[in-house]
Amino acid sequence: MGFAMLMMMTVSAQVNTYIVKTRTAQQKAVAAQQEASKEVASQADENAPTDFISQNFKFYSLCDWKEGMKFMVMPEKYDLIVRTFCDAATGKEVSSMSLRHKIMVYRGHTVSADGHSRMHFLCQDENKMYYFEIPNGSFDDYCYGKLGVPTLAYLGDVDIAREKLMGKKLYTKGRIYRVDTEYDGDGYREVKMPKDLSVTVTQIGVGSRSFPVKIIVEDENGNEFYQTFALSKTNSGMRDDEFIMDSLKHTFPGSFELQDAIMAVNRDFTTYIGKTIHTVQASKMMTKGDGKDRTVTVPKMTTFRVDQAQRRPGTPFVTLSLTEMESRRPYYRDVLFTHPDDLAERDVKLEDFFGYIFGMGEGAELQTTQEARAAIRQGRVILGMTADEVTLAMGEEPNERVQASTGKTDWIYYRSKGKSLFVHFGRDGRVESYETGSSTTSKKTTAKKGSAKAAKQAQKKGTPIED
């Protein structure tokens, strides 16, 4: 690609404020410009929720189009074969690619001398008239369908989205989003993002005819990604019942949730937002590990901050978004704020009741080592732990306690497949050895006397808790 052509396309993209790109594509374009300029130098030198959408984005059928409505020509592959517009001055068909990214202003409809219905447009970029000839029948017959005018993306939705959503905080509701790979093309790659990720709207532009609004967001780490949406579905060419399965992500509620809407839901739980709570029972929660959702058992007396509380539609459950105060790791837990005995639903348990799982305020303040705190978070027992630390790591009291005449104590935790964890405390009340196995076989780790190095190695290794 020549330098002049590259610069012309780049300037075109910059002038047209409806064309927006994630930084990945912008960085590639800058790099390409730098390479091109080197070449020239060397040659010379040699989302709101459904109610938010319905309140702000009105659907306009062709019958309701008003003069002055703006659209952008966004041709797809099919449009390169079947041309959409004719030059009003000559009556000749015009290539859709020659009109790509140009703004068309609707100027009403007429019937030609030979009886064909035509929809008229002023090309804002050229100050030139074009028309779209309706294939069959009258304008009234055509306008009640979902066919619309090919190639045209409705810019009214883009303008309203900019007014209502720029700079807003959103939460991701889907998993698949996009990142641009081309600066002057439509190339992209898909990326997976976690649900309920807090993001900020940084740019809003045009997407495609089917999904006219492109919303670019940025997470707290500076990563940008986007999704394209049919907000009012004006001229999208798609029926409402087609926005299912894979197309669901192109509806605003299918990809984003507006923080304002979440906060409205949170009014019932404002007592808890930002407060410190702790587990009074060991509880299963969701967290992230290796980029995946994982279910883990959180020990009792673990301290959290409540970040968000969101109702699960159609259920009595509320999803709490939590931050564990020591590791700053995010957790999620569905809870009931109404006691199960007061609910008619059968599929509820006492173990899901907020008051059963959590207490207000901080958990136990333990004088403990960094290694022990790390082991507690990972659910491991290590040498030198106190009884309280073992309880926190295991998330529960032992199934059995055996007191020896020597003053030592053994704790036994039952595990799956007939296995058990045996924890042996010395006279000082700290773990001096532990073993896993059945009554006939076991794997034992013991702190050897006079061998500080061996004890330290065993302490670092620890033993995982088997389910």
Image: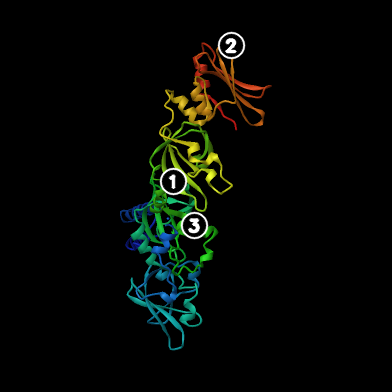
Residue under the point 38% across and 63% down: 158
Point out the tag, 2 or 1, that comes first from the N-terminus.
1
Q: Amino acid at mark 3?
A: Lys
Q: Is residue 161 visible?
A: yes
Residue ID for mark 2: 405
Q: Quadrant of the N terminus?
A: bottom left
For badge 2, the amino acid type reads Ser
248 or 343, which is in the foreground? Answer: 343
**Residue 395 vertical position relative to residue 186 in the rendered view, above or below:** above
Label 3 residue SS? helix
Q: Earlier in the sequence, mark 3 or mark 1?
A: 3
Residue 28 appears in the rendering: no
Vertical relation: 412 (above or below) 240: above
- Please provide percent x and percent y for residue 241: 53, 65
Q: CA distance from mark 3 to mark 1?
A: 23 Å
Reading the image, the residue beneath label 3 is 249
The residue lying toward the viewer, choosing from 426 and 67, is 426
Q: Is residue 139 depicted above or below 326 in this figure?
A: below
**Front residue (pair 143, 24):** 143
Q: Quadrant of residue 328?
A: top left
Badge count: 3
Q: Which callout, 3 or 2, points at the residue further toward the start of the chain?
A: 3
